[in-house]
Image: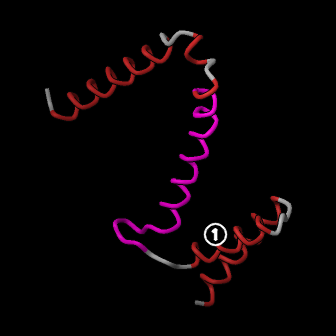
Amino acid sequence: MSTFWIAVIGSSALAFTTKFLGASVPQSALGHPRALRINNLVPIALLTALVAVSTFADKSRLVLDNRALGISVAVVLLIAKAPFPLVVVGAALTSALAYRYF
């Protein structure tokens, strides 16, 4: 059996075990206020990490380019309480124009 198939079977077994253990958690533990708060914050943290890596990384290098400028505009618009579609369009336009002209 090749190393690839050992990795596939091992990761499949790990995924199954993780899902089984997650389904076995008693309801009393899931209903605890701290667990509920953590469950609400985990997707936000994961999305933030994904955006940060996609914005500031190029393979294994740290970069500051048009994507960082677009995120900066989005943050400014969010602080100014602009509607979400305006934030998205403003960030996209800024990134596109910066890419085109710089």
Q: Residue furthest front?
A: 33
Q: Mark 1 is on which residue type? A: Ile
Q: For the magenta stretch, what is the residue range?
A: 35-62
Q: Nearer the viewer, residue 60 or 42?
A: 42
Q: Nearer the viewer, residue 27 or 97?
A: 27
**Residue that appears at 58% across and 90% down:** 102
**Side of 91 relative to 48 (left or right):** right
Quick check: 17 above or below 90? above
Give the number of marks: 1
Q: Residue furthest left?
A: 1
Q: Find disc 1 in the rendering and name its residue.
A: 71
Inspect the magenta stretch and tell me whether residue 4 lies in it: no
**Residue that appears at 48% across and 10% down:** 24
Q: Where's residue 13, x and y in %?
A: 32, 20
> Label 1 neighbourhood size at 10 Å, few (<14), some (14-19), many (20+)?
many
Q: Where's residue 26, x and y in %?
A: 53, 9
Quick check: 55 above or below 4? below
Magenta portion: prevailing SS class: helix
**Residue that appears at 70% across and 74% down:** 73
**Side of 20 relative to 70 (left or right):** left
Inspect the magenta stretch and tell me whether residue 48 lies in it: yes
* Disc 1 secondary structure class: helix
**Residue that appears at 52% across and 53% down:** 50
Q: Where's residue 21, x and y in %?
A: 42, 15
